[in-house]
């Protein structure tokens, strides 16, 4: 598979399955995760956390903890406020949004179960945890706001009285004449969809080590983060340090999925403690802390309605989305984004005019929610595809045929969706056709029918999707967030002819380093093993946003491509100076400088590099070799470069037990230019399984008082190997013209569509029983309830 | 914790005899990571569910977070570091690398140790058996299919190697 990028041959690795270099150290147990780091004189931190969802801190006594063995320092909210200033997570492009000031450690009130109320530092983690148990806290429990449905009722207490009510953000979209469109529809169907609150469950918990040197006022932080430059800006601002005095490093990061791109108060407290103490402070969340303080997400109730004409054409869609986000909007991206995305993305794959959406984002006394892999997409796709299948069923139309009639035509781009999203170029129909062929749709339908006659209930579910990738400044920058939509790549030609690539995008296992090395090797013209990639260090890398919103390949990759082309041009200029001939007749291929006419090698790259670095005295006086180059790239043509895809799920439902067996899963996806097919496929597979988790297993369960009931990995179910299906994948490639590389993102499409595909497959299996489920996760109990059996 | 409770522990880790004074409450995973600097094995859930801390004790897989170090007087412990340096799992590691059967790599040492035990017990394990055996090892990144593929490939290569002679050893040397 060769990408249509000119000038990259013959050392072209674009489209090649090059195994990741950096995977070798991970396979050998030589990874360098944050908690593997040891610093001299380091202290270990533990937190005392509120057992109540909402409580006033009447008194907090640290005396006994201070006397415990190994304890160095303990602090409460007031102590920490001396080092870390509070923040309010709102952005100006979310009009009317509000949130309250949040402190690193609660001052006099805890607002969710798990909020830190004190910090202990000691010589070992065990000592810090021992001492934490000696802290005496007297709480006065306050009424907890737990049900988002009643959060705005007059009788419900207001969590932050200064804000007036529990409404964080609201937004409406109305294209006009929606009621008339529904009135004229041949058929209208409605559903209420519920998505379980769930969380990222990175296997590596959040981890941070902060070291402050008072003599230089220098703060060094090593942490599992997706966005080192964003964190540097925040540490500088809230610890009142010059930005240049803050260095943030991300070494190996054990999974992130959006969980590690937010500001966590306990991490701010670690950095604050390091500044207060002038010593390294280290913290690794345990699993209970992860379950109650990592951001949660996806907790939505969406009422949806679709109107279609007699031919099955969609006329109108309407949604009402209610979501609960915990007591604070999360800094700095805000907790309005997920709901906003639901409004933007619902109906996205389809060609229809009339759309109305209402969004309310409310505060509650539960763990704060924010962006987690595929932000809003799984909700919007489940709502859209659930309504679409429901309408098709009511019309007696095959769901594949219904989609064929409604998906935006492949030749109708650029296209603006009913919600106002601008699509550069998508390939819904090509993907649908490819999917149906890949899965032998007709054959599968025949098998389903035959088995149904034998009492075996199988279902097929389809889910078309769009995915936000390669975001411009429209995502955050326009709202005042100091989050870069650009990224850079610096290339340094070493005297051996090898290339060091330093990139602003970061690696959490997606293969960022791998794809950067492939792009650089291809653009410069060197073997891929001659490229070494450095990421995740604000003292070293070009300024950039990092890795989120499926931007690593599309944004970071384009910067690497442009830097590679520039370095190549400089190398050819150097070679021309050495050889005393015109650079126009030279090319760099496989680390050799060749004559473009004859293809013969005229100079080894290593020799040119040696002369360029060590013997400039032999070159013409007027010529200066430039062997370090840097290029930046930000996508400015569209707010987002959308991708598209479609998934299919094949399940078997046992109507006696309610158990769902996943038989197989398919996906066809279009992420533009594919740099490394294996890496794209594994992003899709891993993403699909995360989506399956939300559809079948994962839910943060709370009681009425705001106590999380299943905050362990024994109780909160995640997908494990035994239950997961094999996944068959296909691709369509529509490169984006917004960049020369043409790559779009691929990190979230799997998660975006899987829950909808599973839901539709289950409902297809349940159709003979006139039963239907729309509340995730689709547990055996919920399926049996739908069947009227419990 | 007073010094009278300290246990003088001697055991063999990755072929090397080590002696340390440990608190009775020290878990094997913390002993390996903090006392011996063997940071390849990780903590994930710290109550035996996720498998990130899986190591071999006297040839059997155990959870490092559920085992107390002081239980292991005289035991033989193997971690990913030891299995790597001996070359024992070089073919398995190569299969993981080629198939991209890891992303962030945090679960990978536990997966490799678990797969090692499986391949020793059931050299011809089917995909279903591999999935079942791995069902105590959590991976958030891959969706498991690539891991199952890599272990299946290794099983097939090893059985082919046995028939042919020394193909598995050759693979190990090449990978090393």
Image: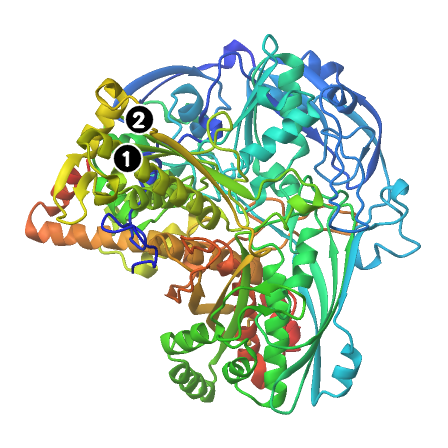
Label 1 vs label 2: CA separation?
9 Å
- Callout 2: few (<14), some (14-19), or many (20+) C-alpha neighbours within 10 Å? few
The local secondary structure at tag 2 comes to loop
Q: Residue at 51% of width from left, 24% of height from top?
A: B25
The residue sitting at the bottom extreme is A310
* Left or right: residue B88 compared with residue B31: left
Is residue A185 positioned above or below A355 on the image? Answer: below
- In the rendering, at what x and y percent does residue A205 appear? 54, 37
Q: Which residue was labeled with disc 1? A: A573
Instruction: Report in which chain the residue with disc 1 lies.
Output: A
Q: Quadrant of residue B28?
A: top left
The residue sitting at the top extreme is A215
Name the foreground residue: A32 vs B163: A32
Q: Quadrant of residue A764?
A: bottom right
* Left or right: residue A516 compared with residue A751: left
Residue A777 visible somewhere in the drawing: no
The residue sitting at the right extreme is A154
- In the rendering, at what x and y percent does residue A615 appear? 23, 19
Name the foreground residue: A565 vs A776: A565
* Quadrant of the rendering where the N terminus of chain A is positioned: bottom left
Is residue A361 positioned above or below A61 on the image? Answer: below
* Quadrant of the rendering where the C terminus of chain A is positioned: bottom right
Q: Residue at 60% of width from left, 91% of height from top?
A: A311
* Sequence-wise first label, 1 or 2: 1
Is residue B113 positioned above or below B14 on the image? Answer: below
Is residue A296 positioned above or below A573 on the image? Answer: below
Q: Quadrant of residue B60?
A: top left
The local secondary structure at tag 1 comes to helix
Q: Which residue was labeled with disc 2? A: A623
Q: Are marks 1 and 2 in contact (CB under 8 Å)?
A: yes
Instruction: Report in which chain the residue with disc 2 lies.
Output: A
* Left or right: residue A295 compared with residue A634: right
């Amino acid at each position: 598979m060769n990408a249509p990028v000119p000038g990259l041959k013959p050392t072209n690795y674009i489209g090649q399955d090059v195994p990741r270099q950096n995977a070798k150290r991970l396979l050998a147990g030589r990874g360098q995760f944050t908690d593997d780091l040891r610093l001299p004189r380091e202290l270990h931190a533990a937190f005392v956390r509120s057992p109540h969802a909402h409580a006033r801190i009447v008194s907090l006594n640290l005396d006994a903890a201070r006397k415990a063995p190994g304890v160095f320092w303990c602090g409460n909210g007031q102590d920490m406020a001396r080092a870390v200033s509070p923040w309010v997570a709102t952005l100006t492009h979310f009009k009317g949004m509000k949130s309250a000031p949040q402190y690193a450690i609660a001052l006099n009130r805890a607002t969710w179960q798990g909020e830190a109320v004190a910090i202990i530092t000691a010589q070992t983690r065990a000592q810090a945890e021992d001492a934490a148990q000696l802290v005496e806290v007297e709480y006065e429990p306050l009424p907890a706001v737990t049900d988002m449905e009643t959060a705005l009722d007059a009788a419900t207490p207001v969590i932050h009285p200064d804000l007036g009510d529990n409404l964080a953000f609201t937004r409406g979209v109305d294209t006009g004449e929606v009621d008339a469109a529904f009135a004229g529809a041949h058929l209208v169907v409605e559903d209420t969809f519920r998505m379980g609150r769930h969380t990222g469950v990175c296997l590596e918990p959040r981890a941070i080590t902060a070291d402050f040197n008072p003599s230089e006022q220098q703060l060094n932080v090593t942490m599992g983060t997706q966005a080192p430059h964003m964190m540097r800006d925040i540490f500088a601002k809230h610890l009142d340090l010059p930005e240049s005095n803050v260095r943030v490093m991300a070494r190996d990061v054990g999974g992130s999925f959006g969980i590690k791109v937010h500001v966590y108060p306990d991490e701010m407290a670690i950095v604050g403690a390091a500044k207060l103490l002038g010593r390294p402070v280290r913290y690794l969340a345990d699993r209970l802390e992860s379950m109650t303080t990592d951001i949660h997400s996806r907790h939505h109730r969406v009422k949806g309605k679709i109107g279609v004409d007699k031919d099955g054409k969609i006329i109108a869609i309407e949604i009402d989305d209610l979501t609960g986000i915990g007591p604070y909007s999360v800094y700095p991206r805000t907790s309005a984004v997920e709901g906003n995305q639901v409004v933007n993305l619902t109906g996205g794959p389809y060609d229809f005019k009339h759309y109305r959406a209402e969004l309310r984002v409310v505060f509650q006394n539960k763990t704060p929610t924010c962006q987690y892999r595929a932000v809003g997409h799984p909700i919007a796709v489940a709502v859209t595809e659930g309504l679409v299948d429901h309408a098709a069923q009511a019309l007696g139309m095959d769901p594949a045929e219904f989609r064929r009639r409604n998906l935006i035509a492949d030749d109708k781009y650029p296209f603006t969706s009913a919600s106002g999203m601008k699509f550069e170029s998508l390939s819904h129909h090509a993907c649908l056709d490819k999917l149906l062929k890949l899965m032998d749709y007709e054959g599968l339908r025949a098998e389903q029918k035959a088995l149904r006659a034998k009492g075996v209930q199988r279902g097929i579910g389809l889910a078309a999707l769009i995915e936000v990738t390669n975001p411009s400044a429209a995502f955050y920058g326009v709202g005042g967030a100091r989050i870069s939509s650009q990224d850079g790549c610096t290339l340094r030609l070493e005297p051996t002819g090898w290339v060091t690539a330093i990139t602003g995008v970061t690696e959490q296992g997606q293969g960022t380093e791998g794809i950067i090395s492939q792009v650089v090797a291809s653009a410069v013209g060197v073997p891929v093993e001659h490229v070494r990639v450095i990421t995740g260090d604000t003292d070293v890398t070009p300024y950039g946003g990092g890795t989120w919103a499926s931007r690593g390949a599309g944004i970071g990759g384009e910067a690497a491509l442009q830097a590679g082309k520039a370095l190549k041009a400089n190398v050819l200029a150097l070679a021309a100076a050495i050889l005393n001939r015109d650079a126009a007749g030279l090319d760099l291929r496989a680390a050799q400088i060749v004559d473009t006419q004859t293809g013969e090698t005229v100079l080894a790259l290593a020799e040119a590099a040696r002369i360029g670095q060590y013997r400039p005295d032999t070159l013409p006086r007027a010529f200066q070799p430039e062997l370090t180059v840097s290029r930046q790239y930000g996508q400015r043509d569209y707010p987002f470069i959308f991708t598209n895809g479609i998934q299919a799920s094949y399940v078997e439902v046992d109507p006696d037990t309610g158990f769902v067996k996943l038989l197989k899963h398919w996906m066809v996806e279009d992420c533009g230019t594919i740099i490394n097919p294996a890496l794209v496929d594994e992003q899709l597979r891993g993403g699909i399984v995360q989506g399956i988790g939300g559809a079948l297993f994962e839910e943060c369960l709370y009681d009425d008082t705001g106590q999380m009931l299943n905050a362990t990995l024994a109780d909160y179910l995640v997908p494990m190997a035994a239950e997961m299906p094999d996944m068959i994948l296909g691709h369509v490639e529509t490169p984006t013209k917004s960049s020369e590389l043409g790559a779009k993102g691929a990190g979230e499409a799997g998660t975006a569509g899987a829950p909808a595909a599973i839901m539709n497959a289950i409902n297809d299996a349940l159709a003979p029983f006139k039963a239907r489920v729309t509340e995730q996760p689709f547990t055996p109990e919920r399926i049996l309830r739908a069947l009227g059996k419990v | 914790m007073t010094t009278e409770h300290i246990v003088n522990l001697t055991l063999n880790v990755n072929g090397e005899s080590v002696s340390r004074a440990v608190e009775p409450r020290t878990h094997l995973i913390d002993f390996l990571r903090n006392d011996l600097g063997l940071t390849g094995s990780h903590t994930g859930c710290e109550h035996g569910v996720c498998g990130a801390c899986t190591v071999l004790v006297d040839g059997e897989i155990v959870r490092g977070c559920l085992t107390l170090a002081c239980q292991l007087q005289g035991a033989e412990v193997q971690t990913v570091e030891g299995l790597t340096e001996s070359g024992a799992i070089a073919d398995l590691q190569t299969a993981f690398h080629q198939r991209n059967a890891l992303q962030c790599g945090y679960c990978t040492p536990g997966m490799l140790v678990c797969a090692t035990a499986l391949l020793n017990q059931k050299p011809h394990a089917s995909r279903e058996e591999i999935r079942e055996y791995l069902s105590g090892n959590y991976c958030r990144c891959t969706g498991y299919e690539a891991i199952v593929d890599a272990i299946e490939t290794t099983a097939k290569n090893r059985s082919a190697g046995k028939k042919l002679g020394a193909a598995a050893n050759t693979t190990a040397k090449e990978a090393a």
